[in-house]
Amino acid sequence: GDPLQVKASKLSSTKTQLPYDYYFLSYCKPPKIVNSAENLGEVLQGDRIENSAYNESISVPLFIFKMMEEQSCKVACRVKIDAASAKNFKAKIDDEYRVIMILDNLPVAVIWDKHDGSQRIVYERGFRVGFKGIHPVSKDMKYFINNHLHFSVMYHEDPETDSARIVGFELIFSLTISSLLLAIANSMKHEYKEWDDKNPKLSTCKPGTPTIVPKTAPQEIKVDEEVVFTYDVSFKSSDIRWASRWDIYLYMKDNQIHWFSIMNSLIIMLFLSVMVAMVMMRTLYRDIAVYNQLDAQDEAQEESGWKLVHGDVFRPPSNTTLLCVYAGTGVQVFGMTLVTMIFALLGFLSPSSRGSLMTAMVLLYMSMGLFAGYSSARLYKMFRGTDFKFQNNRLQNSLNVPRSSLFGILRPQRSDLGGEIFRSSAFWYNVWPCALMVLFVSPAGFSGQFLRRPPIEDPIKTNKIPRPIPPQPRHMNPIVSILVGGVLPFGAVFIELFFILTSMWLNQFYYIFGFLFIVFIILLVTCAEITIVLCYFHLCSEDYRWWWRAYLTAGSSALYLFLYSAYYFFTKLEITKLVSGVLYFGYMVIGSYAFFVLTGTIGFYACFWFVRKIYSSVKID
């Protein structure tokens, strides 16, 4: 007898990627629409958790959805479809929008019409707004609305008490078969003799008897048509425990999941990383021993290789301020990613906690601005920047060139695409990031630069006159080495990237954070080692311009990430609208840009440590 709060979340589609508010369409509305408490992540994802007419009916102002009380042919409301409503319904049916409703924090699940090889039932979140088919009478192609919902609530009884826990929330769909029409739908054209708002009675179904959809004609969407929304409620005992009730949502239905191939790729990448590290250690130890031996025998005048450029290797690069800003931003992104993954591993960011992952990422990104300012300032002091330029570096890091360019991408793709995005419930993307940028991120980055630490001292003095760089072989061309250096880091993540893109754009949950953390560690090791190897080769060729090259070598993996996202768009998604395409590629540019900053910073600091280590290990006169 306890009232069950069925809430409306949003309308979502994998074809447009634009979420809409549930009441954007002319569905039944309760007497008063109440928004549930939402966190920051839900707002950014376009979720609007609101009460629905399946809690309080307009016709009967009582709680009519109660625990263990089955109902049938219950009327929610009657709605007259005007021209605008009909147009909206038809557009959302064409775009394959699904309605997401929530009961006890469980999204409504619909059985998918396919089994995988294990004969396990596969579910999808949400039910379709309607369908398009041939009318049984006119034989014309028409639009039909799913106006009858059969809710099935599964519960698990507590053996020690008389109470029960809700462990499942499903929507049972019927197979509607009529002349030239076949669809998985719950569409009924209800009939009645006289409408009574207080006690409506229908002739197409009766309370207390199961509602049979196939015996009735489907409800067509047309102007001035009156649509009666009805629902059934049934309860079913289940062996599923409350702690396992999210398993049906986390079970992946994609047939392309091959765990063996994923593990095999990761093992190969890890093996390559170990081999590269072993070769580098043996080669460097031999070089250092030879150089020290030559110095002891007064034969150092015949120096060759990387020791020859010891007087120029720590010469400040061009655009030092920009390099410091990018390195600081990379520290910020790295800290956010690492801490977020640790929280996810500990179970704090479960998919059952709506918006928790997005909220954690935003808050951590803001707080990590302190470390971005500190690392950027300390690196800039190492380059002996003047006080005036140091203040300029502070300003650039707090307003931040990478962040500013990111929001420069974010705002046009959210603002200049016309009213469709404005009407979308994700419109708050325009407001929240800019407000957080001004109020939190910039002050944190600015204040981080006031943390006092002595500047980093170079192990070797830099010559006043730059040493000329000899002509380099073709395979040591900077562009070639940078592009080649990005292949290995991308190879460490591209398989996992498929699952991440699937969860983002195909309305699925991503929850294998333990596996993702392993891939992240392998990515860090791979970025560091490939950058060190290529830096060593360039130093042996007497090319000491390693600062920006180290950053771009590992960061070039972002280029391959973006190209893969383009391949995924054309092969896996069914997006046809220009708005949705611009939205997809806009977000993937942002994601690739963040990946560039992250991997570039890892490669830069790894190479920075490597260069300081080898030149502090040899004797220099």
Image: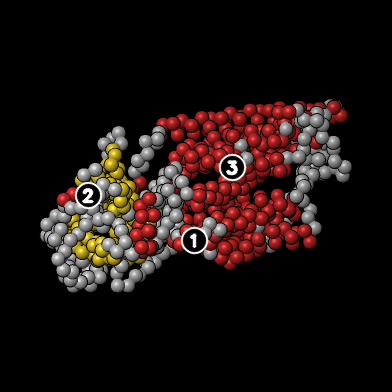
Q: Is mark 1 on a helix, strand or loop?
A: helix
Label 3 amino acid?
Ala
What is the CA distance from the residue labelled 3 to the residue labelled 2?
56 Å
Check if mark 1's residue and mark 2's residue have beta carbons within 8 Å.
no
At a point 59% along the width and 42% down the height, the residue shown is 558
Q: Given the image, on which type of amino acid does mark 2 rest? A: Val
Residue 104: x and y in percent read 30, 59
Tag 2, which secondary structure? loop
Residue type highlighted by circle 1: Gly
Marker disc for residue 411 = none
Position of 356 compared to 150: left or right?
right
Cα separation between marks 1 and 2: 37 Å
Q: Which mark is residue 558?
A: 3
Q: Residue 419 carries which label?
A: 1
Mark toward the start of the polypeptide (3 vs 2):
2
The image quadrant of residue 198 is bottom left
Query: Could you tell me which quadrant the C terminus lies in?
Result: top right
Q: Which of marks 1 and 2 is nearer the N terminus?
A: 2
